């Protein structure tokens, strides 16, 4: 009986030894993959162009910063036709062309109105 019990413990120990060896092999593989990733990253970084020096950085134009132009744009009319027009038959490759509108001021919401949300009732701020 002692012989059988001893044999079972040896089988169990061998199974645990195999598991431990598998964990160690998996750990070595993970470390190898990480080292390879860092090595590849260093190679890619070496091939990149260097960052620009302060003298090569963009500068402001002589007249100062460019300001935003606000204007009201109106769409051009789509030509009337008896057949359906496809995008390539329209000007600007299917985009709707625009022109400067007659009014110089864009329409804005009135202060205190609700805009596009809700009824403008209490609680809107």
Image: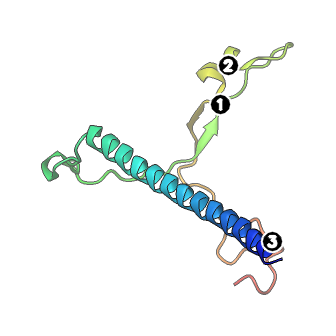
Local secondary structure at mark 2: loop
Across and down, in percent, residue 2 comes to 78, 78
Q: Nearer the viewer, mark 3 or mark 1?
A: 3
Are circles 3 and 1 on residues that touch, CB within 8 Å? no
| Residue assigned mark 1 | 96
The one nearer the camera, 42 or 110, is 42
Q: Quadrant of residue 21?
A: bottom right
Q: CA distance from mark 2 to mark 3?
A: 91 Å
Q: Is 7 placed left or right of 111 in the picture?
A: right
**Of pointers 1 and 2, the one earlier in the residue sequence:** 2
Q: Quadrant of residue 20?
A: bottom right
Closer to us: 108 or 125: 125
Q: Nearer the viewer, residue 30 or 92?
A: 30
The answer to whether residue 21 is left or right of residue 15 is left
Residue 55 is left or right of residue 51, and the answer is left
* Mark 2 or mark 3, earlier in chain: 3
Give SS at disc 3: helix
Q: Is residue 111 above or below residue 98?
A: below
Question: Where is mark 2, residue-wise?
Answer: 90
Give whichever of discs 3 and 1 has the lower sequence position.
3
Residue 36 badge: none
Q: Position of residue 123 (x, y in %)?
A: 77, 86
Quadrant (top left/top right/bottom left/bottom right) for the N terminus: bottom right
> Tags 2 and 3 in contact by the CB under 8 Å rule?
no
Task: Using the image, determine if residue 58 lies above or below residue 10.
Answer: above
- State the count of labels: 3
Q: Which residue is mark 3?
A: 4
């Amino acid at each position: 009986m002692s012989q059988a019990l001893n044999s079972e413990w040896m089988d169990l120990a061998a199974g645990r030894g195999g598991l431990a060896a598998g964990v160690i092999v998996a750990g070595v593989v993970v470390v190898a993959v990480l080292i390879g990733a860092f090595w590849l990253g260093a190679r890619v970084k070496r091939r990149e162009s260097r960052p620009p020096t302060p003298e090569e950085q963009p500068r402001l134009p002589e007249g100062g910063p460019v300001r935003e132009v606000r204007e009201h744009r109106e769409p051009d009319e789509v030509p009337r036709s008896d057949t359906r027009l496809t995008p390539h038959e329209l000007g600007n490759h299917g985009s709707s062309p625009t022109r400067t509108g007659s009014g110089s001021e864009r329409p804005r919401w009135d202060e205190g109105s609700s805009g596009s949300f809700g009824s403008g009732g209490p609680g809107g701020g």
